[in-house]
Image: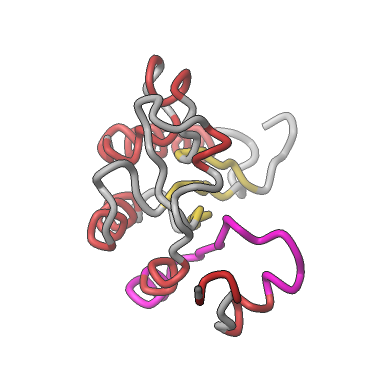
């Protein structure tokens, strides 16, 4: 209420072992969709009860976690959260938990999968999706928007 935020984002993206391992928040919440739902529902109720009832709830997440790495998993996750969240910031790569990769490696080693993000946009045309991951320049952003392949991907 005090800061009058426009948006409050739940980060279900962090693959750090200290976050998703010991404390069970961050990316591990993608595998605990009912817990994620309850957190978002509580956030929504607090916004409604407060003075700033215009703030929008959003989620930042990956397109997969560990072996849960397919379109249906991500689509089911989003579908379950739709009653309490309609904006998703999608990091276009899965993450690997359990200390196998550190947070920095999780931002670069799992391959980007923009087509999965595009498919989610087609499945959920009324959801507000924002793409994240691998976009370092305006040229990168244009290539993603217009479907231009990266020369490195063609090798």
Residue 119 screen position, x and y as percent: 37, 73
Which residues lie in the magenta part? 120-141
Residue 46 screen position, x and y as percent: 50, 32
Query: Which residue appears farthest toward the front when viewing the image?
Result: 155
Which residue is pictured at 56% across the width and 79% down the height? 149
Residue 26 screen position, x and y as percent: 45, 32
Lateral position of residue 1 relative to residue 59, left or right: right
Residue 86 drawn above or below residue 1: below
Query: Which residue appears farthest toward the top when viewing the image?
Result: 22
Which residue is pictured at 35% across the width and 32% down the height? 28
Which residue is pictured at 48% across the width and 60% down the height? 112
Q: Is residue 127 magenta?
A: yes
* Quarter placement of the N terminus: top right
Of 10 and 63, the residue lying toward us: 63
Which residue is pictured at 38% across the width and 67% down the height? 116
Residue 133 screen position, x and y as percent: 57, 55
Q: Is residue 124 magenta?
A: yes
Q: Quadrant of residue 51?
A: top right
Residue 120 drawn above or below residue 20: below
Residue 127 drawn above or below residue 13: below
């Amino acid at each position: 209420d005090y800061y009058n935020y426009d948006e409050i984002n739940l980060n279900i993206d962090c693959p750090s072992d200290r976050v998703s391992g010991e404390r069970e928040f961050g990316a591990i919440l993608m595998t605990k969709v009912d817990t994620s739902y309850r957190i978002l529902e509580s956030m929504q109720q607090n916004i409604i009860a407060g003075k700033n009832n215009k703030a929008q709830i959003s989620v930042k997440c990956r397109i997969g976690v560990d072996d849960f790495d397919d379109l249906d998993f991500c689509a089911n996750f989003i579908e379950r959260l739709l009653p309490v969240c309609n904006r998703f910031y999608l990091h276009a790569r899965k993450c690997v938990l359990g200390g196998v990769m550190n947070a920095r490696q999780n931002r670069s080693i799992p391959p980007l999968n923009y087509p999965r993000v595009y498919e989610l946009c087609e499945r959920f045309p009324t959801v507000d999706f924002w793409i994240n991951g691998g976009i370092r320049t305006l040229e990168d952003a244009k290539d993603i928007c217009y479907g231009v392949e990266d020369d490195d991907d063609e090798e």
